[in-house]
Image (cartoon, rainbow, N blue to C red):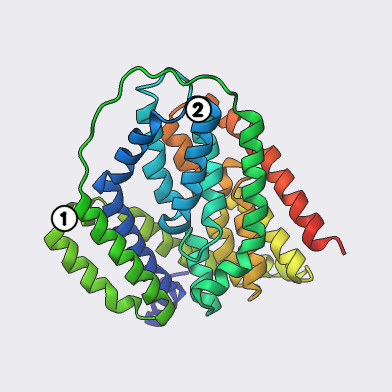
């Protein structure tokens, strides 16, 4: 296919879901600002002296990760939490590999609950045309199941081994930047519900140009361009006749749409799988369930998993990741099937 025809270029432009890109842009700006503020770094270091063993330390970071991922997206949460955990590894003698692996799983669990928790939810939320609280209500059942099973895994797997502290270094934080970012976050959620996100973009850009230009420089522009390309690529793929025939050969009911999304996510990651499946089904609830259940499976099922493993920088950790992620995935998926589809 060539791009000589202006109509074809226009079609490519139309493949891009611009409301999602605008919302993702604001989300990345605000989460970058919160990261730069170093507020959570200080918070974590202050709490480190409270925990007496690995189990309580793991529970703290894994619960914290789930909560942050509900609002900062799973990817950005890991960019905040994993460096904090790695920094803590410099002041304690205990191995933190398992904690980081479970932080990745936890980020996928926490992020599934809200429309702004991860990129696929943000995309589905824009397509779905429901409000913020309705989305949370729909996702709440699988969140509760996955979160409770996650806590059970952590309680069983992590030992009561004593935390051995070496030293704690003090870091500076920017309280004003953190508060401004938090206020913009509240405004962003209101804008999502009232559909005026596009008008918020110039306000945020101008504000951070004056407050902290570094935020606009350091935000993940690559992720924005990646999403633009994904919208184009997977719309084109979904237009290929043989692909259409394969997908349409299934009865695209709720159960099948959910399971196809789960299966595809394991190989192409849950965000591209979501964009792809929307071309064949408007059962957004099934796609949301599938893409979010899938994230805690193979490492490639979610970009958040890859981010955590890359920051851990240990090739052996990939095998360890699947040692915990796959049992967790099959356990949570099995219980969800039993509770919701066993009739």
Disc sitting over residue 199 in the figure? none
Nearer-the-camera pick, 319 or 232: 319
User: What x and y, as percent, mark residue 250?
Assistant: 78, 68
Label 2 sits on a secondary structure element that is helix
Q: Which residue is drawn at 41% across and 37% down?
A: 82
Left or right of 281: which side holds 54?
Answer: left
Label 1 sits on a secondary structure element that is loop
Disc sitting over residue 212 in the figure? 1
Nearer-the-camera pick, 150 or 119: 150
Q: Residue at x 38, y 44 (%)?
A: 79
Q: Which residue lies furthest to the left in this view?
A: 210
Left or right of 6: which side holds 250?
Answer: right
Q: Crowding near pointer 2: few (<14 within 10 Å), some, many (20+)? A: some
Visible in this render: residue 237? no
Visible in this render: residue 73? yes
Residue 330 vertical position relative to residue 95 in the rendered view, above or below: below
Q: Residue at x 39, y 79 (%)?
A: 10
State the separation of the CA atoms marked 1 and 2.
34 Å
The residue to which callout 2 is attached is: 97
């Amino acid at each position: 296919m060539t791009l000589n025809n202006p109509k074809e270029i226009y079609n490519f432009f139309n493949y891009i879901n611009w409301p999602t890109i605008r919302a993702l842009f604001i989300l990345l700006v605000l989460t970058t600002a919160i990261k730069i503020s170093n507020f959570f770094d200080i918070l974590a270091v202050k709490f480190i002296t409270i925990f007496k063993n690995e189990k309580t330390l793991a529970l703290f970071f894994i619960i914290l990760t789930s909560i942050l991922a509900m609002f900062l997206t799973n990817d950005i949460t890991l960019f905040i939490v994993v460096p904090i955990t790695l920094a803590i590894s410099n002041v304690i003698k205990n191995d933190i590999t398992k904690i980081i692996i479970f932080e990745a799983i936890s980020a996928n669990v926490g992020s599934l609950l809200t429309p702004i928790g991860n990129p696929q939810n943000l995309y589905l939320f824009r397509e779905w045309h429901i409000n913020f609280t309705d989305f949370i209500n729909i996702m709440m059942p699988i969140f509760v199941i996955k979160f409770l099973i996650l806590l059970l895994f952590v309680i069983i797997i992590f030992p009561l081994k004593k935390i051995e502290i070496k030293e704690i270094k003090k870091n500076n934080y920017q309280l004003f930047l953190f508060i401004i970012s938090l206020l913009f976050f509240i405004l962003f959620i209101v804008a999502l519900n009232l559909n005026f996100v596009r008008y918020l973009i110039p306000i945020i850009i101008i504000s951070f140009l004056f407050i902290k230009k570094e935020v606009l420089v350091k935000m993940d522009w690559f992720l924005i361009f990646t999403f633009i390309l994904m919208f184009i690529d997977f719309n084109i793929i979904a237009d290929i006749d043989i692909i259409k025939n394969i997908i349409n050969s299934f009865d695209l009911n709720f159960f099948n749409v959910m399971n196809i999304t789960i299966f595809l996510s394991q190989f192409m990651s849950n965000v591209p799988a979501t964009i792809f499946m929307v071309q064949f089904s408007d059962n957004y609830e099934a796609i949301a369930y599938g893409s979010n259940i899938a994230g805690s499976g193979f490492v490639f099922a979610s970009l958040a998993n890859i981010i955590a493993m890359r920051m851990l920088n240990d090739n052996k950790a990939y095998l360890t990741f699947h040692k915990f992620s796959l049992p967790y995935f099959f356990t949570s998926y099995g219980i969800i099937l039993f509770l919701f589809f066993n009739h």
